[in-house]
Structure formats: structure tokens, C-alpha cells
Amino acid sequence: MAKLLINGGYKKRLGASGERKACKYLKRQGYKISERNYKNPFGEVDIIASKDGVTAFIEVKTRNTDDFGTPSEAVGKDRMRRYILAAEHYFAGRTIDCTVRFDVIEIFRGELNHIENAFEA
């Protein structure tokens, strides 16, 4: 039982570390971070950021090993569907004038890879 708590804490720290690294990267690239850990009825969006009229809903996946595949491979159809529903929820009742994009930032063994348009609505 104690091992699960330790590993669970490790995963949370690893994920939080990856999200911090992703935000720093996005800011250096000129993005404005609108939301972090945006909770909605469909789950949670790691980062919502905008740049040049594009609002990106970004899933951050951090891994140190490829025991279960690369980080981006962990973003399955269910996660994609939730992000699309979350975007609809985020913009509900608002008049928007932007392009919406769904990105994945994978951090694998410390290296960051920003995959723009990782999936479409």
C-alpha cells in the first residue's frame, strides 16, 4: 500500500514538473497562458494558451521511460473527445473570434516536443 502512495506522489510531481516546463516554454514562444488545470464537467485541461489569434487547448504528458510508449501515445481517443467537449464548454455563451487548436506537449526524458494540431475536433 505504501508503495502505491509513493508512486502516486511521484507521478503527480512528475506531471506538475512537466506542466511548469511546458508553461515556461510556451511563454518563451510568445503564448499567453489563459488557464492552467482548467476543470470542467468533462475533466481537466492542462493548459489553455493563445497566440496570434489561436487558442490552444494543450495536454501535457511527461514520462521518463518508454515502458508504456511515448508520452504522446498516451493521448487516446477518449482524452481527445474530452478536450473537444472541454473547449466547447470553455467557449459556451461567449462570442469568439479565434481559431481553436488541440496540441500535445510531450516531455520525454527531459526533452520537450510541442505537437501542434495533434488532433482535430
Image (tube, rainbow, N blue to C red):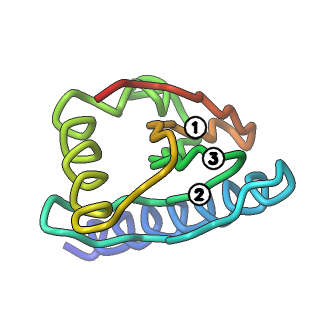
Name the element at disc 2. Answer: strand
37 to the left or right of 94? right
User: Residue at 49% across / 44% down in the picture?
Assistant: 61
105 to the left or right of 38? right
Q: CA distance from mark 3 to mark 1?
A: 23 Å
Q: Which quadrant holds residue 84?
A: top left
- Tag of residue 106: 1
Image position, residue 22 (x, y; %):
67, 54
53 to the left or right of 76? right
Q: Are marks 1 and 2 in contact (CB under 8 Å)?
A: no
Q: Give the residue pinned by disc 3.
A: 53
Query: In the depicted view, which residue is nearer to us: 85 or 111?
Result: 85
Nearer the camera: disc 1 or disc 2 = 2
User: Residue at 50% across / 71% down in the picture?
Assistant: 35
82 lies above or below 15:
above
91 to the left or right of 69? left
Name the element at disc 1. Answer: strand
Q: Give the residue pinned by disc 2.
A: 49
Crowd around label 3: few <14 · some 14–19 · many ≥20 (10 Å): few
User: Residue at 20% across / 28% down in the picture?
Assistant: 77
Split into 4 quadrants, where in the image is the N terminus? bottom left
Crowd around label 1: few <14 · some 14–19 · many ≥20 (10 Å): many
- Specify which label sits upstream in the sequence, 3 or 1: 3
Split into 4 quadrants, where in the image is the C terminus? top left
Image position, residue 110 (x, y; %):
73, 43
Query: In the depicted view, which residue is nearer to us: 67 or 108?
Result: 108
User: Residue at 43% across / 61% down in the picture?
Assistant: 11
Q: Are marks 3 and 1 in contact (CB under 8 Å)?
A: no
Query: In the depicted view, which residue is nearer to us: 79 or 10?
Result: 79
Q: CA distance from mark 2 to mark 3?
A: 10 Å
Amino acid type indicated by mark 1: Glu
